[in-house]
Image (spheres, grey):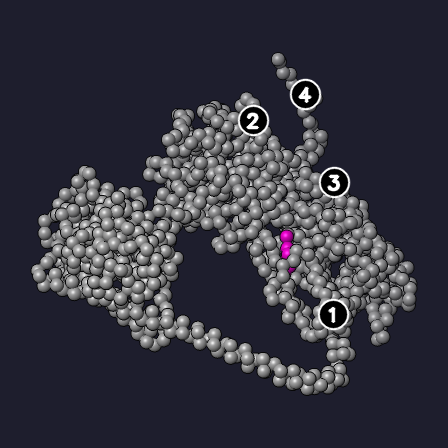
């Protein structure tokens, strides 16, 4: 095709200059007029909110904070929750309301089509000077002066209303007939405004002011064009703004010249009887425009129209309330509330989004915002006010689930059907990088730049450079749905899947058990906040929280919040400030510090429902939230989350038709009378959910919660009362300061003084009759007393028998530790070195001291029966001590003692170890007494019965003389002995004591014959498991002359308290301790520095004590390893053995002696040391 030049299209001369000037004017107009693209956060108040008339004429807020709305049907008041119509009950004549103002005394003036009405003392009355009704013109036609009067525009003329000395209303004309003839505009007054002693009003086509009787007119020479002036505003900087049908002018303080603030073009042209002008909390001026709303930002006008969410109807009224929010009245569409101000910008298809169902948002390095939705995607440029469709070239379907921005500037889209797209903005090339085998739920890019896709068939890792994808942990994570992924500050990844919670760290995936119980159906959302807290949600409502870590399990507890407990959660995300954002089906809950706040459409959000994973946090602190109807950009989260102060308010209080008003209100008591109170809340202009709680003194013991705005009490007795009221901000979880109303209900005549005197005479007669009746009663009482003495005597005898039994038990139990001491001394003197006899003697002596303490309490009458004191403790150490004492008892008659403990016994339990020792020592002592040259066995096994509980099976078996089956039941009685025991010492108390203690432990002693002859005593104990963190651990003093001489000892224990205690002990005796919290940490220490001894726990997360022992034998074969554990080591097939072992809790002396021996002697396997005999059960 050949292009030819058309000379007729080239401008010449003046035509060319006119074109240039026109282009310059267009540019200037575009600079002065900024059209807003974001959807305004508007809340509609209509019939559902109590506003039954939708044609709003005027809006006003009084000093108390109530918003009043005048409509074509009458007057309405907003109480912080909804609108209520004002009618005859408050003395108001319902009619179209056309004007408002409040005078210096706080009285509200309302101009209506029926006349002028004044609210005073909570009720309305007529203002009728000379008994004649007075009608105000429509618009800004009421203005309070400084002396309690009111300026009024009526019949297009200006009038002044004031009260005379008798409180009668008078109306006067400020201008004479001559003045009105000289100034024709005085008969065409359009609006009035009073400030600082000056009264401003529109007079014809001019602007006029009246000050101290002096009239002044403002025209073009003062910068005021000819116009009909309908609106006035006193700005906070002292300037005066005036609004005409075509023009806007501003007068600076102290200036005589008005400055033009006109909108370019015809944007300001509005034909109306009133045009309001208001100022927001940031100092910007707002007024109506020809297409909607205009806002002066200090430099230019910003326009808002139908594309921004305003209805395509005229704006009839505007105010900015005390909370800084904007109320917009419309013709026929109700009342609009702009709640968020500039804190929220909403985007919908009207702003160019390709779809409304938003699934993901990402910020590219270029500054553009990329959006993923069910129709593909959109792009919002850094300086654009309109979204553009995504530039990707891709075949349908276009349903996307996630968009991610890579560091190189490329944009990655993960489509629902499994395709993964990479778009290069520089070359505009779209490439299908991979296709996942399952439908995509979402995707994540970690701090290392790796891509992870969570699908309906598991989790996949994607190499962005090669496009190679592989399923993550196929042997661990099943082919079921994974829904979310999060990364913590340590670089660990957390995956929420239907199969549970999984963690990626140190190059491998691991399943993390959620305690105390896993959720049905797995988990759907996960997040980790910068403070290290892990947050998790499932398919059921509610939120779980706990500490993230490297353990195989994580303990999560439900967040104690009623709103979250009832929320179906769709995303969990942390923003750049460390706040947690929880998107749900009823809004977005935000945790900032320790305070939760819920944001909803009342706060400016586009919609209360959110979408799965639809959240993005920008570096500037703002956040983006996707919803089913569009996108919300929260520009100022701090402003939205700032606490708001609610102020409850008593609207009315009546008792039996009598109003309770004043500081000391009173009303006459009436039978069947009811107290009725109605209340409101101020400071809640957005209409967020609020409920009340109240209490009435002497009636309510606690606060009464009530969603309604009233309280009713029937049948109150006479007296003085105090009613307290608080407002509860449900979304902000805050309580207002309480307010109160004190009142008195005066009693009726029958509670007067004469009535009480008559009652006294009747009482005296009743006393005489009562005295006679009392004599008869005393006789019967004496008979009952005699019976009671008999009963009490029997009870006292029972108590004395119980005390005698207790004394006998203590005396009996004193024999066992004393026998242990004597046997230890005997074997020690004979030269035996099989045991630590001083330690055995000390242990028996401590038992004897405990029994002596009980005996002293008994002597002081502080003890009448045995008491159980449960505490956490080490089970194996306890059983080991019992075995040592039992061995001594058994050997007195040449018996062999056998301890048979199951391998699965718990390490720590909660029980009364002292009482259990009494039981076992009594049973074993009895067995030793009645057995010669035989065996005595103590067998202990465990069975799990409930979470954190086990059932201990404890049995003592011997090969002694046995017990006849016919005598087993009665042997549980005190001082009863078997028929075959007459040749043995004793009193028959042992089994009775055991039975009594076991009953207190909710256990029962069973007595059976042993298989090979003899007896078998057994019982079951339900005990709770314990943790080392519950122990109050300390190492007893003692160490002799041990000198560590600076020798380095590595202490390995995952429990910080136990580890620090050991280190302090070693450091105090001259050793150099090196702590390690795990086997991995210990190996790292061994690689870096030489140690002379390793003290390690047996069971630790990750590398346990055995694995550490194997590593030490391999890498440091000459270093001895001492096991210090709550459980004894078990023999192994591979021959691996510790050099020595001690059960927790050992004394400081024992620890130091074993350490000193290991450092002074060649290494010897633990299996070669002499220990009490122990076998496996069965």
Q: Quadrant of residue 963?
A: bottom left
| Residue 1092 location (% of width, % of height) | 15, 50
Q: Which residues are magenta?
A: 689-693
- Under circle 3, the secondary element is loop
Residue at position x 66%, y 52% from top? Answer: 687
Q: Residues within 10 Å of mark 1 (few under 14, many from 20)?
A: many
Q: Position of residue 187 (x, y in %)?
A: 88, 57
If the image is split into quadrants, where does the N terminus sit?
A: top right
The answer to which of marks 2 and 3 sits earlier in the sequence is 3
Alpha-carbon distance for marks 4 and 2? 49 Å
Separation of disc 2 and disc 1 at Cα?
Answer: 67 Å
* N-terminal label among 2 and 1: 2
**Which of the two discs, 4 and 3, labels the residue nearer the N terminus?**
4
Q: Are marks 2 and 1 in contact (CB under 8 Å)?
A: no
Residue 690 drawn in magenta: yes
Which numbered mark, 2 or 1, is in the foreground of this view? 1
SS at mark 4?
A: helix
Mark 4 to mark 1 CA distance (whole Å): 90 Å
Using the numbered discs, state the Cα–Cα distance from disc 4 to disc 3 in whole angstroms: 46 Å
Which SS class for mark 2? loop
Disc 3 target residue? 312
Q: Which residue in the structure is indicated by mark 1? A: 660
* Quadrant that contains the C terminus: top left
Residues packed near mark 2 inside 10 Å, few (<14), some (14 to 19) or many (20 plus): some
Q: Which residue is mark 2?
A: 398
| Residue drawn at (89%, 62%) of the image | 133
Q: Which mark is residue 144?
A: none
Task: Label 1, secondary structure: give it.
Answer: loop
């Amino acid at each position: 095709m050949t292009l030819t030049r058309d000379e007729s299209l080239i401008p010449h001369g003046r035509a060319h200059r006119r074109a240039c000037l026109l282009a310059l004017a267009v540019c200037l107009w575009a600079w002065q007029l900024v059209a807003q693209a974001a959807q305004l956060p508007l809340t509609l108040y209509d019939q559902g909110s109590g506003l039954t008339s939708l044609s709003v004429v005027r809006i006003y807020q009084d000093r108390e904070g109530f918003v009043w709305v005048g409509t074509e049907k009458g007057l309405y008041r907003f109480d912080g929750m909804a609108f209520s119509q004002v009618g005859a009950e408050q003395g108001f004549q319902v009619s179209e309301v056309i004007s408002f103002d409040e005078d210096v005394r706080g009285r509200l003036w309302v101009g209506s089509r029926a006349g002028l009405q004044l609210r005073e003392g909570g009720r309305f009355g007529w203002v009728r000077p000379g008994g004649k009704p007075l009608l105000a013109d429509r618009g800004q036609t009421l203005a309070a002066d400084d002396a309690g009067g009111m300026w009024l525009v009526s019949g297009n003329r200006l009038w002044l209303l004031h009260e005379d000395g008798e409180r009668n209303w008078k109306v006067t004309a400020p201008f004479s007939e001559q003045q009105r003839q000289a100034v024709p505009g005085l008969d065409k007054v359009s609006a009035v405004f009073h400030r600082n002693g000056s009264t401003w009003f529109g007079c014809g086509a001019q602007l006029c002011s009246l000050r101290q009787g002096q009239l002044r007119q403002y025209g073009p020479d003062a910068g005021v064009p000819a116009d009909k002036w309908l609106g006035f505003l006193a700005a906070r900087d002292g300037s005066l703004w005036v609004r005409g049908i075509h023009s806007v002018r501003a007068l600076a303080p102290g200036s005589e010249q008005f400055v033009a603030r006109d909108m370019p073009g015809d944007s300001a042209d509005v034909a109306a009887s009133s045009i309001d002008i208001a100022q927001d909390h940031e100092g910007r001026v707002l007024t109506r425009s020809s297409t909607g709303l205009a806002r002066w930002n200090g430099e230019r006008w910003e326009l808002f129209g139908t594309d921004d969410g305003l209805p395509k109807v005229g704006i009839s009224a505007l105010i900015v309330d005390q909370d800084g929010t904007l109320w917009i009245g419309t013709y026929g569409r109700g009342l609009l509330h702009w709640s968020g101000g500039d804190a929220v910008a909403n985007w919908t298809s009207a702003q160019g989004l390709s779809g409304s169902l938003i699934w993901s948002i990402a910020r590219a390095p270029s500054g553009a915002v990329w959006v993923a939705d069910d129709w593909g995607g959109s792009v919002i440029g850094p300086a654009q006010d309109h979204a553009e469709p995504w530039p990707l070239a891709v075949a349908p379907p276009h349903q996307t689930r996630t968009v991610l921005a890579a560091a190189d500037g490329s944009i990655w889209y993960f489509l629902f059907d499994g395709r993964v797209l990479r778009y290069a903005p520089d070359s505009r090339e779209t490439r299908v990088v991979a296709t996942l085998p399952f439908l995509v739920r979402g995707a994540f890019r970690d701090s290392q730049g790796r891509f992870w896709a969570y699908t309906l068939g598991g989790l996949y890792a994607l190499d962005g450079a090669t496009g190679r994808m592989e399923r993550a942990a196929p042997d661990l994570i099943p082919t079921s749905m994974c829904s979310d992924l999060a990364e913590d500050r340590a670089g660990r990844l957390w995956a929420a899947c239907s199969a549970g919670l999984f963690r990626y760290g140190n190059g491998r995936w691991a399943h993390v058990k959620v305690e105390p119980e896993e959720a049905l159906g797995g988990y759907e959302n996960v997040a980790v906040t910068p403070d290290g807290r892990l947050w998790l949600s499932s398919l059921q409502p509610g939120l779980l929280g706990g500490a993230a870590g490297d353990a195989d399990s994580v303990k999560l507890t439900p967040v104690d919040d009623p709103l979250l407990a009832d929320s179906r959660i769709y995303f969990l995300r942390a923003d750049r400030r460390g706040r947690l954002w929880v998107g749900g089906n009823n809004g977005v809950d935000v945790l900032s510090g320790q305070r939760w706040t819920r944001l909803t459409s009342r706060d400016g959000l586009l919609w209360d429902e959110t979408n799965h994973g639809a959240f993005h946090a920008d570096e500037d602190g703002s956040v983006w939230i996707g919803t089913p109807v569009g996108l919300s950009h929260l520009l100022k989260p701090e402003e939205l989350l700032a606490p708001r102060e609610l102020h409850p308010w008593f609207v009315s209080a009546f008792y039996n038709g009598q109003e309770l008003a004043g500081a000391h209100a009173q009303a006459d008591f009436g039978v069947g009378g009811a107290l009725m109170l109605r209340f409101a809340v101020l400071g809640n202009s957005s209409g967020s959910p609020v409920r009340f709680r109240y209490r009435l003194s002497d009636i309510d013991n606690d606060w009464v919660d009530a969603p309604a705005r009233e309280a009713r009490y029937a049948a109150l007795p006479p007296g003085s009362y105090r009613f307290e009221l608080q407002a509860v901000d449900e979304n902000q979880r805050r309580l207002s300061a309480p307010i109160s109303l004190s009142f008195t209900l005066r009693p009726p005549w029958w509670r007067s003084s004469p009535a009480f005197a008559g009652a006294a005479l009747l009482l005296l007669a009743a006393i005489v009759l009562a005295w006679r009746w009392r004599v008869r009663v005393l006789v019967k009482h004496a008979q009952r007393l005699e019976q009671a003495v008999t009963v009490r005597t029997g009870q006292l005898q029972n108590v004395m028998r119980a005390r005698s039994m207790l004394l006998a038990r203590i005396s009996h139990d004193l024999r066992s530790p004393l026998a242990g001491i004597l046997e230890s001394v005997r074997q020690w003197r004979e030269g035996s070195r099989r045991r630590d006899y001083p330690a055995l003697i000390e242990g028996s002596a401590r038992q004897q001291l405990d029994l002596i303490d009980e005996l002293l309490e008994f002597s002081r009458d502080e003890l009448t029966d045995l008491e159980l004191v449960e505490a956490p403790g080490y089970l194996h150490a306890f059983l080991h001590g019992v075995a040592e004492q039992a061995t001594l008892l058994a050997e007195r008659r040449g018996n062999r003692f056998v301890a048979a403990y199951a391998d699965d016994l718990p390490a720590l339990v909660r029980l009364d170890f002292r009482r259990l020792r009494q039981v076992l020592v009594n049973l074993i002592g009895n067995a030793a007494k009645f057995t010669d040259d035989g065996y005595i066995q103590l067998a202990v096994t465990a069975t799990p019965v409930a979470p954190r509980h086990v059932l201990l099976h404890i049995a003592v078996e011997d090969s002694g003389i046995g017990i006849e089956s016919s005598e087993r039941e009665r042997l549980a009685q005190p001082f009863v002995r078997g028929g075959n025991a007459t040749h043995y010492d004793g009193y028959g108390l042992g089994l009775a004591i055991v039975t009594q203690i076991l009953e207190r432990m909710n256990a029962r002693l069973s007595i059976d014959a042993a298989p090979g002859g003899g007896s078998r005593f057994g019982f079951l104990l339900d005990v709770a498991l314990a943790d080392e963190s519950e122990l109050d651990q300390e190492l007893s003093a003692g160490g002799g002359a041990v000198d560590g001489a600076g020798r380095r000892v590595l202490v390995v224990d995952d429990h910080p308290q136990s580890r620090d205690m050991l280190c302090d002990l070693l450091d105090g005796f001259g050793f150099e301790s090196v702590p390690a919290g795990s086997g991995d940490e210990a190996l790292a220490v061994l690689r870096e520095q030489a140690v002379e001894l390793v003290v390690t726990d047996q069971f630790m997360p990750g590398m346990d004590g055995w694995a550490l022992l194997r590593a030490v034998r391999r890498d440091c074969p000459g270093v001895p390893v001492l096991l210090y554990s709550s459980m004894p080591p078990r023999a192994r097939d591979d021959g691996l053995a510790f050099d020595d072992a001690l059960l927790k809790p050992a004394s400081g002396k024992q620890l130091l002696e074993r350490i000193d021996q290991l450092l002074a002697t060649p290494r010897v396997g633990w299996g070669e040391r002499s220990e009490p005999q122990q076998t496996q059960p069965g």
